[in-house]
Amino acid sequence: MANAHSANLTEHVGHHDHAHDHDEHEESFVSKYIFSMDHKMISRQFLITAIIMAVVAMTMSIIFRMQLAWPGEKFAFINAMLGDKWGKDGVLDPNMYLALVTIHGTIMVFFVLTGGLSGTFANLLIPYQVGARDMASGFLNMLSYWFFFLSSVIMLGSLFIEDGPASGGWTIYPPLSALPEAMPGSKLGMTLWLISMTLFVVSSLLGGINYIVTIINLRTKGMKMTRMPLTMWAMLITAILGVLSFPVLVSCVVLLICDRSLGTSFYLSDIYIGGRPLDNVGGSPVLFEHLFWFLGHPEVYIVLLPALGITSEIISTNSRKPIFGYRAMIGSMLAIGFLSFIVWGHHMFLTGMNPFLGSVFVFTTLLIAIPSAVKAFNYITTLWKGNIQYTPAMLFSIGLVSSFVTGGVTGIILADSTLDINVHDTYFVVAHFHIVMGLSAIFGMFAGVYHWFPKMFLRMMNKKLGYLHFWVTFVSAYGVFFPMHFLGLAGVPRRYYTNSAFPMFDNLVDINEIVTVFAIIAALAQFIFIFNFFYSMFRGEKSPQNPWNSNTLEWTTPMANIHGNWPGALPVVHRWAYDYSKPGAENDFIPQTVPLAEGEHDGGGH
Amino acid sequence: MKLLILIGLVLLIIAAHQLMRVVELSRQFKKGHEWSVSDTDNSFNGKAMLLFGFLFIGFFFWQVNRWSDNSLPGAASEHGLKVDALWDYNMYLISFVFVITNAFLFYFSYKYAGKKGVKATFFAHDNRLEMLWTIVPAVTLAFIIIFGLKYWNDITERSESPNKVTVELYAKQFDWTARYAGKDKVLGSTDYRQIDGGNDVGLDTLDATGYDDIIVKNEFHIPVGKEIEFKMRSRDVIHSAYMPHFRAQMNCVPGMVTEFKFTPNKTTAEMRKDPYVIQLMAGINEARAKKGEEPVEFDYILLCNKICGASHYNMQMTIVVESEKDYNDWLAKQKAVRTIAAK
């Protein structure tokens, strides 16, 4: 132990008791499983909470998809899920429809793809892949999870109140969300939404600051920034985006709370509702939109970048090839991260914002296509002349690349204000962002779970069930979201309870039915995953130390969840993470801890 | 129903239990481990990727073929024709990128599926390639940006036409009202505090320019070939005035007056004779017949396209485009709101 201490000073930072990590002192159930400060346990807590939230949000989507395909039909399923109040005789109530789309969006974007994705993989991977004993602050990390938990409980709790949950859309534009007279969901449900999201931001900030500090300060000896796996770069940039943008959401939310409760007029002006004129004058809902999207757009990349980082790692490992253009990948992530802060106005071309300002946002938004294209082409080149190992994680990663392209190209249309005029807020947009977030980001998350499950639970997930899960999901997910483009081309607005009020949409019934049938299949397929996940957690095959023959540091830790991660000294890093199939090497992988041979170049040269 | 769910749950548990037994039994017979990917696995998934690639791109063309005919008819406004042309160019471009990129992805996924004993090629970067796929997208995007912004500036320019017709669209939960300036060609000013049962859009009763304003519901008319300047207002929450056939949309924001202008170039009657529209309406009426509903004729429509509450899905107004003469006749028949002045 003594030399372990002197070997590396960084191991002392923030870890009083970890130095004696492998004398396994007794831990109570509470400190081990509940108020844990261990990054591995916190990561598992995030993941399982996110899975529960995802199941809720997915079930909601099935309910409203049934209404959209077969409007007015009676479904015992809907009545059983929502009761007589919101699903009388099995027909979905219009207010509940809006509530479901709102909470579905909120949960998926924030609780699954932000809390779940970053929370799980940043926590799991950062200390492992930079070679640290734990996060810089285990305590803040624990708080981060518990704020997330509390916020999840409040969000779910809001489903059970009398007036129903928030229902003004996940973007909660005032005045709709500010005025209880406007819709039942803007009463207590909206208050709970705002409280929940504020707590969520606290969680996200506590986590984000921790991620940044850990990556910057606790890298082990030899882990230069330019040797970090791309997952680390993705997590770092994501955390910076979160820390800079989430506080703006809080200010946005606080002003809305003031308007709702204290009679201020930040977002309200000249309104007549509920049979009387309101006193509020001078505010503007457009201000809200600016504040909201100043978070809202970086949020898209907060969702996407971790997924891209995860798949960079998985595609390289399983192609048995270095990731193509490592530095270009970092550069494009930095470019995407930077640009994501100056594009928010593309959500607001038609809000009455000055059209010239719109032009500026057209320009900045379309620039994002360049680094995104670089990333897509680099992934494809990584596959070229590889020796692709089809683990379930690899399948999902390839699925991500496909959907990243498919969903990305329609972004070029939507970013062009001229073209946006006619498809803004239609199903074309719904298709676009679901293919990017609902496919790409979710696939990144699945890929991560399949790949690092052995690190989390020390056991393997079942491979064949993984294949089945992937193929059914991949086919049906495209089956859900691709046809939606054509609804958009026919001018169908989003968030319509039914399209049957307009004869012009009557010929689109078959599209809506196809979408719903695929959605039901996709939802059922997720039970394969859930079964595989929980079954393998307890009964899966025991994993070897490095099941995927991977180079990164997490696979040099023993197959036991111990405090401090490495029993002895921290590993020392000698090379980048992508020496796969290096000419002259004996194996097709060289872990980062292996010293460079004489005359060997680091970082892709040879 | 509760019973059905209970039975479903029990069945699910039994299914899960059986699945566990299958998994455990199969593990005993299996040579490989969960982490080892055999050549069979790789070959199967590689082929599946290729097959998927074909089906996916095939599905894309199938949808284009089958569902493009459900799309909105060609634009019925002058700027809309340009929007449509730009749309087509961009669509061809992105469809090309989409097909090519996915084709490469799925082909490589098939071609380089792993085999035992094969070693991947160590290929870490190549400046020429990376420059290529930075510069080509950059140049392409430059064109997209230039054309997009050129049209955007034309579309959003303030209306300068001396012959323009000004129409106010007033949104509230959950209907639309249109207001015309009347003989003095000036829309009367408004004050939301004066809204009441007889003053639906909140006309300022002290402003005499509003006395001759014309207010209509359910349907409004506009003349073909003249620039129509829309001024949008909202009474309560944000709505969005979406007129898809004219490629026109603008939010209606409480406390603001937003604007959008376009020049309709086809009357409703002309649209009804358009071959594409005839085909479109035949499809619609066929679907309606199946539901046992009356056939309908083509109409231009104004929809709400920003979530505004429970009846958001049914907030509509019919737009009639007609010759200037018919329009003037129609307008002359509408009553001015002079009654307000009497108060």
Image (spheres, helix red, strand yellow):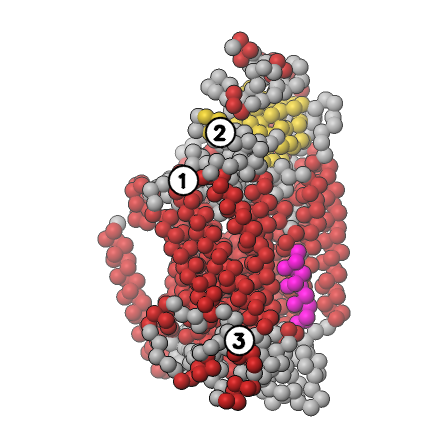
Name the residue tied to disc 2. Answer: A278
Q: On the rendered structure, is A576 left or right of A544?
A: right
Of all residues, the one furthest to the left in this rendering is B3
Specify the farthest residue to the top: B342
Queried whether the magenta region covers residue B205, the answer comes back as no
Rendered image quadrant of residue B188: top right
Mark 3 neighbour density, 10 Å: few (under 14) some (14–19) many (20 or more): some
Disc 3 residue type?
Val
Please name the residue shown 67% across and 61% down the image.
Answer: A335
Residue B140, quarter of the rendered image: bottom right
Q: CA gap, disc 2 to disc 3?
A: 56 Å
Q: Is residue A60 above or below residue B160?
A: below
Residue under label 1, please give it.
A187
Span shown in magenta: A324-339
* Chain to which the residue tagged by mark 1 belongs: A
Residue A535, image quadrant: bottom left
Secondary structure of the residue carrying numbered label 1: loop
